[in-house]
Amino acid sequence: MNQDLSYYFKKIRKNKGISQHYIAKDILIQSAYSKFELNKMNIIYISYISLLEKIDISHEEFNYIKNGYQYIKKDELCNRFFKMTYNNPAKLNELILSIDAYLVDEEDILLRDIKSICEALLLLIEAKDMHIIRLKVKNIWSRLSKYDGWY
């Protein structure tokens, strides 16, 4: 069982002054929720999401708290990208190096795409040649264009 999950639900619930009865209502019976908090029972994903809604916390916030008020490395890299001003070559290069270090141990399509976009942005700053830039991100577009929907 995932002790972290039950531990942090209990910690957040108590911190917010929410009773087990309130959080479990319409999701689980109170005794099942109690067993979950005691790490004697797992819950299904839909219950997990519903419980998060009851304590007014997103999945991302929950993971942030669970991870000692820090982002996991992938989330930290994604956040750096989305908060970045894209005309800063030093920050783009720094992010590329950080992503490369992450990808040594862990394969991740999203981070590979972000790395390619960063490299394309650097090319835009340096070369200003749209043909070269299109080639750099062609693999991303080829993959995404096959999807019926984007999530």
Image (spheres, rainbow, N blue to C red):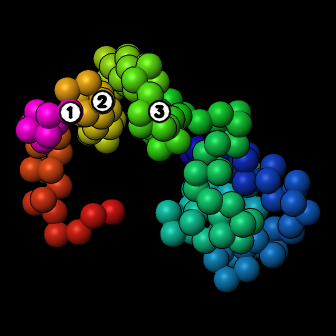
Task: Quickly name the residue at label 3.
Answer: 77
Is residue 13 shown in magenta? no
Answer few, some or many: residues within 10 Å of disc 1's Cα (few below 14, many 20 plus, some between 14 and 19): few
Answer few, some or many: residues within 10 Å of disc 2's Cα (few below 14, many 20 plus, some between 14 and 19): some
Q: Nearer the viewer, residue 110 or 64?
A: 110
Q: CA distance from mark 2 to mark 1?
A: 6 Å
| Position of residue 36 in the picture relative to residue 46 (left or right) | right
Q: Taking 135 as reference, is 54 above or below it?
A: below
Q: CA distance from mark 1 to mark 3?
A: 26 Å
Q: Picture quarter containing residue 71?
A: top right
Task: Quickly name the residue at label 1.
Answer: 128
**Res 120 visible:** yes
Q: Which residues are magenta?
A: 128-136
What residue lies at 51% left-to-right and 64% top-to-bottom?
44
Going by the numbered disc 1, the residue's amino acid type is Lys
Going by the numbered disc 2, the residue's amino acid type is Ile
Q: The residue tagged with tag 1: helix, strand or loop?
A: loop
Q: Picture quarter containing residue 34?
A: bottom right
Q: Position of residue 93 (x, y in %)?
A: 38, 20
Going by the numbered disc 3, the residue's amino acid type is Leu
Q: CA distance from mark 3 to mark 2?
A: 21 Å
| Position of residue 94 in the picture relative to residue 148 (left or right) | right
The nearer-to-camera label among 1 and 3 is 1
| Position of residue 112 in the picture relative to residue 38 (left or right) | left
Q: Earlier in the sequence, mark 1 or mark 3?
A: 3
Answer few, some or many: residues within 10 Å of disc 3's Cα (few below 14, many 20 plus, some between 14 and 19): some
Q: Quadrant of the N terminus?
A: top right
Task: Quickly name the residue at label 2.
Answer: 125
Considering every residue shown, the one lying at the far bottom of the view is 26
